[in-house]
Image (cartoon, coloured by chain):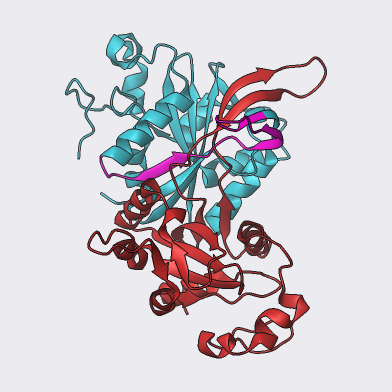
Chain colours: A red, B cyan
Amino acid sequence: MAIRYPNGKKYTPKRILLENNNVKHKDERFSNRGMTLEEDINETNEYYRSRKIANIHKKPLPLQIVNVHYPKRSAAVVTEAYFKKPSTTDYNGVYKGFYLDFEAKETKNKTSFPFKNFHQHQIDHMKDIISHGGCSFILMRFAKTEEVFLVKAEDFIPYYEDKTSKRKSLPKTIIEEISYPVAVGYHPRVDYLRVIDRILRLN
Amino acid sequence: MAIRYPNGKKYTPKRILLENNNVKHKDERFSNRGMTLEEDINETNEYYRSRKIANIHKKPLPLQIVNVHYPKRSAAVVTEAYFKKPSTTDYNGVYKGFYLDFEAKETKNKTSFPFKNFHQHQIDHMKDIISHGGCSFILMRFAKTEEVFLVKAEDFIPYYEDKTSKRKSLPKTIIEEISYPVAVGYHPRVDYLRVIDRILRLN
């Protein structure tokens, strides 16, 4: 099935999009106007849930709660808590019987994606998910161009863990080779399940 | 494969266990001595993860953060936050390629499990998980006897939603009929994946 933008235009592959500023950034209807990748994915997941397409959620931020105050006749207030490092990825859920698990990351860089956006424990989590038969991936956004790429964890990890290379980031040219472009639109904003269908060969 | 307790004793079916206090409560090695069901499940999940059996996590408590203080030279402190109602169940993850999603609930009652322990939005979430091909269930513990039952969501929901009945709780006799007993031991403490194997007919 052809992917269509809300205006009925057919989704055109990445290489063409890259030369077509009109479709990609200039049309106000597609502009996120300051929305973060997280907000876009949350809206997309809400779209998927409301249309019974998939059940995928962002996990709450893990907090170490130290003090809670229980005032009379009103709700309990956490008065002291600290942010903990998440031990997993940010999003997971179920789609057509498959376990999906992913991380979403954004960079302001134009030509490469910094490895420092990832932590070893997240990489270890991704490997573990793969070993149990789950589908693990990363959604990477280049904020300046609003391009989103879906990279399968198994395709990303060898670059991240390549000790012979002194790279501190993954060049965008490589990302374009190993990833799938994600159609960015209005509703849903980041239609990553279209790519998952291709990866899982579901249509 | 026969399920064995840490002392080498073979797991014996529910009806026999119910008459066998020696195995079930009196042996100190099996006593949780005040551990909550949540603590037991967290330890069990840690056991499963460390042995590469499954990757299942408890989701952090969702908090609405209102104020964060950023002191110089030390970690950010959340100084005002409120508990939000979770919109999903507490645990999810992947096991042998299957998406598992469950809620753990405990009662001090002896003969029935109160429905007020569940919220409609959790039930709706369970239905949604089932519709997407996930495996949705509830772990119920009777705290007094330390018995744990695994009830598949599809077997529980009809009782919860039965409008013709005026029941405010599910009798334990019914739970025993519709559920699977979970072996409670020392390591892992609540070996619910044994039951999942039976449900998914994986062994």
Asked if residue A24 lies in the magenta stretch, the reply is no
Asked if residue B65 lies in the magenta stretch, the reply is yes
Report the quarter where the N terminus of chain B lies.
Answer: top left
Q: Height in image: B170 above or below B122?
A: above
Write down the region rendered in magenta.
B51-78
Instruction: Quadrant for residue B83, please give it.
Output: top right
Q: Height in image: A151 above or below A90?
A: below
Residue at the left extreme, as displayed = B8
Where's residue A42, x and y in %? 64, 57
User: Is residue B85 visible in the rendered structure shown here?
Assistant: no
Where's residue A122, x and y in %? 40, 49
User: Is residue A31 visible in the rendered structure shown here?
Assistant: yes
Residue at screen point 33% across, 28% down: B183
Instruction: Quadrant for residue A62, please give it.
Output: top right
Where's residue A30, x and y in %? 71, 76
Left or right: A147 as drawn, with respect to A86: right
Q: Height in image: A136 above or below A58?
A: below
